[in-house]
Image (tube, helix red, strand yellow):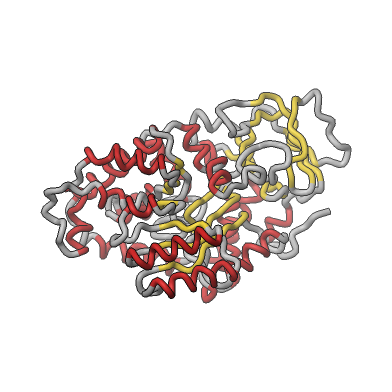
Amino acid sequence: MKRFLVPVFSAALTAQAADVTAFTGVNVLPMDRDRVLSNQTVVVRDGRIAEVGPAGKVKIPSEAVRIDGRGKFLMPGIAEMHGHLPPAQAGEQAMKNTLYLYIANGVTVVRGMQGQAHHPATRDRIARGELIGPTLFVSSPAMTGGAVQTPEQGGRLVREYKQAGFDLLKIHEGLTPATYDTIAGTARQLGLLYGGHVPDPVGLVNCLKAGQSTIDHLDGYLEALEGDDSPVKNADGQTRARKLPLHADMGKLPALVKLTVETKGWVVPTMALWRVLYNAESPQVLDKMEGLEYMPKATVESWKQAFQKRQTVFDDPRAAARLVEIRNQVLKELARAGAGIMMGSDSPQQYSVPGFSMRRELADMVKAGMANFEILQSGTINPARYFKQEAEFGTVAPGRRADLILLGADPRKDVDTIFTRREGVMARGVWRTEADLKKGLAEIAASYR
């Protein structure tokens, strides 16, 4: 019988870790298209979905652990496509806690964006069953203008990061066009994904045309929308950050959307975080956010201090409100045009707690005008398509890794049910009830008290 070798929390020991598990009488959301398969039996064997079929036609192995799915809905686990992993100096327990927070919220895939040397090994430990956690795709250390100062250095680092086992490159601010082009060209030669920020000297249009695989945070769209007569075009960086939302020309948006679709660029919008970073959220709301009890007190205090400091910078509520409006419109038009969109909340980050932040992100995607099923696909089949791993995860079908969420209601009607009506989570074939997950969370909270 399969067992985790190093359980993180005592609650995890109560999880079902059977060779064979069967969800019976359950409504399945395959997530390949907008449909539901009613009254199904889903058999999981050795961490994979072995069979999906009508309850009366699928034979359940006698040794199977049965999970009653009558009246419930089974969907793929969701993906955090802009997550972070703790640095080595934070210690082993910080890593275990972070990974558990993701699993406890139904996040079974994480694309780690800010790599360190130990992250590929962490990915591999999870794959071997030595750590409880989501399947990881880990990026290189951030390729910033300060870290990569010449094209030659950029090309060399790309090759080194490929050799070190990173799954993709993290593009960040400050790269010159020549250095960016070398990084992008070398990555394409090696078959390595590269995504993240849009360096200002390069610009959104050039990043899309260069084949950057993801544009995270909707980075570069506001700058590309700047009006030709903008009075802050040549202003200092702080002034531009404060005032640029007030000088956008939305008439430029259709061309940017068209280019995004044509170049097959994926977008990871991180909507909720940007409301925090632009002080478009009240401190009273932030202080009462769900999930803060699962973060170290010193971390939460640093978030509060950063928010208070930004209040002296982003002091124009009109600009904050306009930024939110622009980002909502950009995301809505990208979705309407069929652009590739993936869930991501940039966690852990300021008031973005791993797993818990996804609830706020989904709510913001709804507010921006995305349809519920589009939102669900952005966290399931779309990440699988992005990684070209449709045969591995992202749908409920035979052969897929058994990363599943059991819900008490249909999330197509209300995406918030992923968090409010969750019955349990299966990651790599290991089932944990909601009660199991909450016990593990309670241990984390107690350790920080």
Q: Residue at x 74, y 35 (%)?
A: 42
Answer with the quarter of the image where residue 324 lies.
Answer: top left
Image location (x, y in percent) of residue 274: 33, 52
Which of the pair 145/247 is nearer the observer? Answer: 145
Quadrant of the image occupied by residue 11: bottom right
Give the total number of marks visible in the rendering: 0
Viewer can see residue 172? yes
Q: Is residue 445 visible?
A: no
Q: Position of residue 116 (x, y in %)?
A: 52, 70
Q: Is residue 38 left or right of residue 110?
A: right
Relative image position of residue 184 (x, y in whole percent): 44, 61
The answer to whether 82 appears left or right of 4 in the picture is left
**Residue 293 percent location from the top left of the image:** 48, 58
Residue at 47%, 46% in the rendered image: 343
Q: Using the image as rendered, state which of residue 224 and residue 368 is in the foreground.
A: 224
Task: Name the foreground residue: 37 vs 406.
Answer: 37
- Residue displayed at 34% across by 49% down: 285
> Up-down: is 45 above or below 70?
below
**Is 76 rendered above or below residue 279?**
above
Q: Residue at x 58, y 45 (%)?
A: 384
